Image: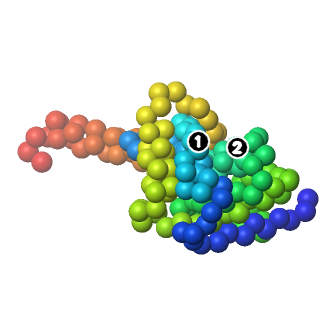
Amino acid sequence: METLKIDWNYYMEEMKGLMIFTDGSKMDGRVGCAFVVFYNKTELDYRKFRLNESSTVFIDEVTAIQKAVEYIKANDLGQVNISSDSRSALMALSAVEEARDIINNIEEDIKEYKGKIILTWIRAHMGNFGNELADQLAKEATLISDETISFVPSRNQIRNEGNKIIKDLRQNLWNDSKKCAMDQNPNR
């Protein structure tokens, strides 16, 4: 398979044309992401997605970018700037080699697109209207009752959850043994 490197730039306020701002959010264990479409600073459209609780914030941010790319392709929008406040997602997309399928799928979609998709990084919570609206929509997406996107947990997530369960079981056994010892010998 041919190696693809995707570059990304720093967001410049004077960018014009089609802009899509993406964001992800995790609140109270619920995960959501969103994107909002602007043309010359006029809002045209938006989409919100609720992910399953096993999703990480990173996957949430990447999913927002993936959904924006799918939207661009489905609507054949020509040249579009996608702005994300997730530097880690953009860095993963610009990596020469990547093991995660979702990243490779986004790279392939961008590569196959007949128009041009430009990725830009925007600093979060700095008052940019597009980024703030994407952030608000992502938070609203966490409140959607049914999951719209589900992911199988990664090996690391499964291992970490297993380790947490084992740690909790050991702690409960320890607490029970101390309680049992105290019940048998209250003078201790």
Q: Mark 1 vs mark 2: which is more N-terminal?
A: 1
Residue 8 locus on image (x, y percent): 68, 69
Question: Where 188 sits versus 120, above or below?
Answer: above
Q: 30 or 37, which lies in front?
A: 37
Element class at badge 1: strand
Whether residue 164 is visible here, answered yes or no, is: no
Name the residue located 64 percent from the left edge and 72 percent from the top edge: 9
Name the residue located 33 percent from the left edge and 40 percent from the top edge: 172
Whether residue 76 is visible here, answered yes or no, is: yes
Number of numbered callouts drawn: 2
- What's under tag 2, amino acid-wise? Tyr
Element class at badge 2: helix
Asked whether disc 1 touches disc 2, contact meaning CB atoms under 8 Å apart, the reply is yes
Name the residue located 44 percent from the left edge and 39 percent from the top edge: 140
Q: Which mark is residue 93?
A: none
Left or right: residue 107 compared with residue 18: right
Q: 57 or 64, which lies in front?
A: 64
Q: Residues within 10 Å of mark 2 (few under 14, many from 20)?
A: some
* Outermost residue, top side: 146
For the N terminus, which image quadrant?
bottom right
Q: Residues within 10 Å of mark 1 (few under 14, many from 20)?
A: few
Residue 181 locus on image (x, y percent): 21, 41
Q: Quadrant of residue 29?
A: top left
The residue where tag 2 is placed is 71
Residue 109 locus on image (x, y percent): 79, 51
The residue where tag 1 is placed is 45
